[in-house]
Amino acid sequence: MEVRTLTAEEARDDIVSRDPATGREIGRVPVASSEEVARALSDARTAQNGWAKLSFRERGRVVMRARAIVLDEIEEIAALISEESGKPADEAIAMEIVPTLDLMQFFARKSAKLLKPEKIDIGQYGLMGRSSRIVYKPLGTVGIISPWNFPWAIPLGEVVMALMAGNAVVLKPSELTPMVGVKIGEVFKRAGLNDDLLQVVTGDGRTGAALVEARPDKIMFTGSVATGKRVAETAARNLTPVVLELGGKDPMIVLEDADVEMAAQAAVWGALANAGQACASVERCYVHESISEKFIARAVELVKSLRLDVGTREATDIGAMSSERQLNTVEEHIDDAVARGARILTGGRRNETLAGSFYEPTVLTDVDHTMLVMRDETFGPVLPIMTFKTEDEAIGLANDSPFGLTASVWTKDIARGRRIAEQIEAGTVMVNEVLYTHGIAQTPWGGVKQSGLGRTHGRLGLLELVTPQHIHVNRFSFIPDFWWFSYTPRASKLFRGFAQRFATGNPLQTSLLLPQMIRRFFERRP
Ligand code: NAD
């Protein structure tokens, strides 16, 4: 088996984190080698034993102390997120910090209830003095590998959930936003969490790969489909379970009875917030032809009013893109679309007056599914709009994608919205909403198809971070089981009776076997 290691020599150069809006250096972090990652994991494993013994209330206290620190330093944290990722500081507060403050109080207070041992209905075995319960135990160590687009909300949410479930964590933040990752570690340390229980290992993809190779008890990966598949391949060799939160190409369907003004505002925010660099961004907008003219005109008007600027400046709506590489992908998609007949109604080019990686917010029409901009993840400030004639056509277009993260349906008829939502292949479908449900920590987050495996957030997300243990008790232990040795002729007949009657699940049927069972009970055993 191939084992790749990142030696200290190879990991020699520090990562320099820069503000994509200005190019200014924000900080430097080391690239952790394979050996350092393995050590972090082993220390985490040792520390976890004590942590798992604490009650939910005690763990929750640490999380609530960390929450108080975040709230205290909200402006400083928002500025750091803004400088390292390019997004407006206000947006960092609205889309990253507020949701995590809510997530922290929710899991600190509710994890005990969400992971309460559960009694299982075991049918007629219950009449035989048996009972079954599921208890949820921590996994041990969780490796979290996170992207740059929500450098605070994504890893922090997973860290909180993993800790509340009783695990220790090794976090590998994106190489584009390492300082935000380091800040998360610092907040918990100051909240009194043992250093070994949350360790932040900085580095690039090689450090991420080293973390997977080091065999944590679970990997929570968020990032691109290509990297996610690589992570899954490596993890499979060790049977390490993975949750993969991958890319999206999320559709928005605007039906003829939608509130056009609200739908247009939502489309513009859903496509352009975070400069379109959200896995759940509106990346494909399908509008009924009868309202498309009005919808497009309003969307263009709204987009033209947006202020593109450095994220830390007041009233900035759209900041720099996180990297030149991402901006190049957007350029490639727009060039391809235009070459195939798309029309740019506004934007469609890099902003030359601002020095950093800024792309003008863009509205495209006359697009179709041959174009990259309707097929691959663009991950940029682009709203491509296509029209449709019938509901079935819209559903078909929405599902014509390898991705399935979120989707939205816009209509005043909620029942119709729900009905259509259920026909869409996506982990989350919103009716009259876009993009934001990652911010509702109580709800499950995750995709279908190439958008990933497993869930984060909500009870389903918490269950990913524990192992269920089934505990079965027999209170009638003074009676030998009917199916134990010896397989006498009487037993043989009773087994057949069980097949015919007991296995129906009907106690009346089973009661017809009572005389046979009594005979079997008194049967002499060797
Ligand atoms: P990426 O796949 O390039 O990197 C993600 C993380 O993986 C980084 O920390 C990186 O260092 C690490 N990594 C790289 N190679 C690795 C390897 N071989 N083994 C282990 N780790 C490795 O993704 P990105 O560019 O940082 O993020 C953008 C992508 O993330 C988009 O596709 C976006 O849709 C997706 N995303 C998904 C969600 C979701 O919840 N589904 C949320 C945010 C972002």
Image (cartoon, rainbow, N blue to C red):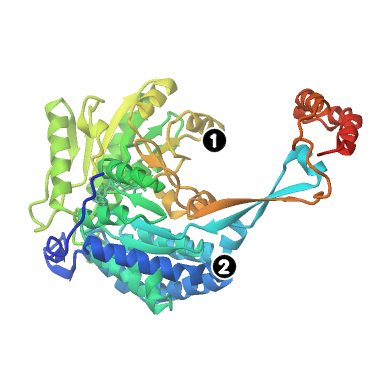
Task: For residue 89, say whether it is visible.
Answer: no
Q: Secondary structure at mark 1?
A: helix
**Between marks 1 and 2 in the image, the one whose residue lies nearer the viewer:** 2
Residue 304 marker: none
Q: Identify which residue is drawn at 43% across, 31% down.
A: 425
Q: Earlier in the sequence, mark 1 or mark 2?
A: 2
Which image quarter is the C terminus in? top right
Q: Which residue is mark 1?
A: 414
State whether residue 262 is above or below residue 66.
Answer: above
Residue 524 x, y percent position in the rendering = 87, 37
The amino acid beneath tag 2 is Phe
Q: Residues within 10 Å of mark 2 (few under 14, many from 20)?
A: many
Mark 1 residue crowding within 10 angstroms, few (<14) / some (14–19) / many (20+): few
Nearest the eye: 322 or 191:
191
> Taking 220 as reference, is 103 above or below it?
below
* Nearer to the camera, 243 or 73: 243
Residue at image coords 76%, 47% = 130
Instruction: Give yes or no for contact between labels 1 and 2 (Cβ–Cβ under 8 Å).
Output: no
The residue positioned 46% from the left and 67% from the top of the image is 48
Which residue position is annotated with label 2?
56
Q: Residue 504, relative to residue 315: is it above or below?
A: above
Q: Position of residue 395 (x, y in %)?
A: 41, 26
Separation of marks 1 and 2 at Cα, in angstroms: 39 Å
